Image (cartoon, grey):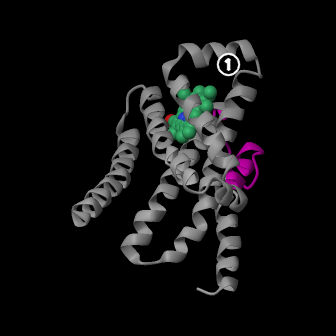
Amino acid sequence: MTPGSIRGLKALMFLVCLVPLAKLALETFGLAGLSLGANPIEALIHRFGIWGLNFLLITLAVTPLRRLTGWNWLIRFRRMLGLFAFFYVLMHFTTYAGLDQRFDLAVILEDIAERPYITVGFSALVLLIPLAVTSTNGMMKRLGRRWQKLHRLVYLIAILGVWHFFWQVKLDTLEPLIYAIILASLLGYRLWRKYERSAHAR
Ligand code: HEM
């Protein structure tokens, strides 16, 4: 891959990552015959949440995919995918805080303290902040090996995200179960690699 084609692909990827947002905007404003349905606030919270989780899992899929295919250039897209995960989760939180709770800080804090699935979701959001802040090349250089250690938090964040999803579902657990299986495979792959490497080192 030449630097030019990587740049082109990055621009294309950026636009593709904005598609869920564009579709939600059309639905919100009732354009192109689309709509959010009977409960638009709930629909927005749900869709931003799902896309946050989708992007988290897509980001975690980059390394296994790269190793299995040998397409090392995939790594160039990981930061953008991770930042989009943060963006969609932040929109999820902002919709909940702004549209659902009208930025009533007392109610939001009470929810975080007393509704376990919100406590878990909020912890995941808070943990995502240092990862987003340290995602620049400068920070990567400055932190050195500590950068990698810090960014391993993404595993915990993804577990909290899926757990949060599981916990808020009332009846049909199929969808969060599918997310849990995908996450378990992505994390299982890493554990298996680690085991293989240490077995070879012995
Ligand atoms: C990494 C962080 C997070 C992820 C990945 C995430 C993901 C999700 C997902 C996938 C859903 C289910 C959507 C559906 O059923 O279609 C959901 C629901 C929800 N989340 Fe999150 N979330 C996160 C953080 C948060 C935070 C910080 C809050 C608020 C403090 C929050 C509040 C909610 C609420 C209120 C619902 C809807 C529950 C209901 O309808 O009863 N989430 N989230």
Determine if the magenta segment contains residue 65: no
Toward which corner of the image does residue 129 lie, by quadrant? top right
Q: Amino acid at mark 1?
A: Ile
Nearest to the observer: residue 172 or residue 102 = 102
- Residue at 77%, 22% (x, y): give it: 103
The N terminus is located in which quarter?
bottom right
In this picture, is 159 found above or below 104? below
* Residue 48 in view here: yes
Spot occupied by residue 88 in the image (x, y as percentages of width and height): 65, 46
Q: Ligand 1 closer than 8 Å to the CB at disc 1?
A: yes
In the image, residue 188 above or below residue 70: above
The residue segment tinted magenta is 21-40
- Displayed-image quarter of ligand 1: top right
The residue positioned 32% from the left and 57% from the top of the image is 194
Q: State the residue position of label 1.
A: 108
Residue situated in front as seen by the camera: 4 or 11 = 4
Q: Position of residue 21 (x, y in %)?
A: 69, 52
Q: Residue at x 39, y 48 (%)?
A: 183
Inspect the magenta stretch and tell me whether residue 28 lies in it. yes
* Quarter of the rendering containing residue 202: bottom left
Q: Residue 59 versus residue 202: which sits nearer the camera?
A: 202
| Above or below, 104 relative to 78 | above
Is residue 33 something that shows in the picture?
A: no
Q: Is residue 196 left or right of residue 105?
A: left
| Horizontal side of residue 18 vs 189, given as left or right | right
Q: Position of residue 125 (x, y in %)?
A: 61, 36
In this rendering, the answer to whether 92 lies above or below 2 is above
- The answer to whether 60 appears left or right of 85 in the picture is left
